[in-house]
Amino acid sequence: MAFSPTTLNDNSINSTKSKRISFVDIAKAFAIIFVIIEHCKQNNTMEVRTWICSFHMPLFWILSGLTFSSKKYKTYFSFVKSRVKALLIPYYILSLMLLASCTVVFLSFDPAYIVQRIESIFIAKRLSDYYYSMWFIPSLFFSVLIYYFIDKKIKNKYVLFGISISMTALQYFIFKNIKGFYYSIDTIPVVISFLIVGKLLKDFIFSEMSKKKIAVICLVSLIINLISCYFNTGLISYYDGEIQNPVLLYISSVSGSLFVIFVSKLINKFSILEYLGKYTLIIYAFQNSLLIPVSNIIIRKLQTCFSIEPTEFIKIIYVVFSLIFTLATSTIMIEIIKRFFPFAIGGSYKKKKVNS
């Protein structure tokens, strides 16, 4: 997840001028699609949610590590400044925009409720009653501030791999004792772990290879992921602080992410997915607390109006409807934000050229 001008809407976590990479955008689009499907909880099976949760968040972090480079910054201060603009400011602005939207759409005009929501945005304590589920953004912000030094100073791949494994193990023990800390800094170890994975896999993923080899990698990665999911019983949830087995988590996260990334390489060009992948930050911000609940309201109205029985097949239709509704509505919001509020995604207004 995770790239500039904001972490979730460009190919580089570092530079707004970097050339876009089609398969990275496509992979991010798949990642956000999986996030939306997983959040359609009432119409989803536990098996589908378990599979998606086995890799969908690490996929964002691996993609971030894949495009990260500390070399693009002259000083640490300049790096921090760029991350504040690309992550922290968008977190606050998009959270407030989400609050305003939810207040209007759900007619929640109680002053006490609004104040509690605003407080929760700035306190940013995950799992608190009034906190919107945008924990991923501040978590990544604080993680990359630390990862900067790892990327800059440590070059030995074996040392990096050791740190990555250790960080995943550390996350397991942290979640045993701490869940839902302020600004989600309790998730920093696992984020750094998979940022390192992205760095370690960079040469392999960007290397030239035949479509046949890519297809084989996709198949092998999927098989490994499914096997690890089978043995790793229970739902993985970084938001709730739930990790069953750190070894199986690591295997399923890497293999599942490789599956999506190499499927994206196989596709290579797909303008709709590339567009969605470019603006996943906006989609991520509004999907869980606004768009999916609205789609559920529409679904309940249709159920009542047409007396539809919620069979397993119908539930699949509901998930597809929620996905299409969320992405279609997000597209409208993307264009509005791009046009009128570019600073909400780490951008700035374009100055119109005046002809002399």
Image (cartoon, grey):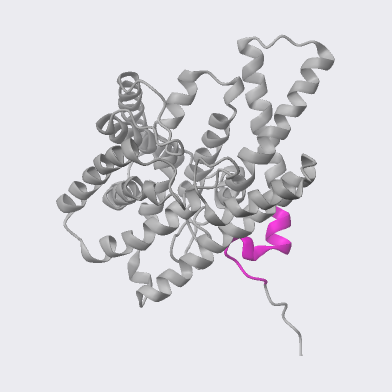
| Residue 160 in view here | yes
- Up the image or down, 194 lies above or below 321; here it is below
Residue 47 position in % (x across, y down): 46, 19
224 or 282: nearer the viewer: 282
Q: Which residues are magenta?
A: 335-349
Where does the image place residue 58, in percent across and percent down from the top left? 39, 41
Q: Nearer the viewer, residue 34 or 247?
A: 247
Which quadrant of the figure has residue 289? Answer: top right
Residue 22 seen in render: no
- Image vertical order of residue 168 relative to residue 41, above or below: below
On screen, residue 24 versus residue 251, left or right, reads right
Q: From what the image shows, is residue 265 above or below residue 296? A: below
Q: Is residue 196 left or right of residue 32?
A: left
Q: Residue at x 61, y 50 (%)?
A: 282
- Seen as rendered, the residue at the extreme front is 112
Query: How many numbered circles are shown?
Result: 0
State which quadrant residue 246 falls in.
top left
What is the chief secondary structure element of the magenta stretch? helix
Q: Is residue 118 magenta?
A: no
Q: Position of residue 317 (x, y in %)?
A: 66, 20
What's the residue at 75%, 46% (across, down)? 103
State the quadrant of the C terminus: bottom right
Q: Position of residue 316 (x, y in %)?
A: 62, 19
Q: Residue at x 31, y 32 (%)?
A: 249
The extreme bottom residue here reads: 356
* 336 versus 266 height, above or below: below
Q: In the displayed orientation, state which residue is furthest to the right.
A: 305
Magenta segment: does it hold 341?
Answer: yes
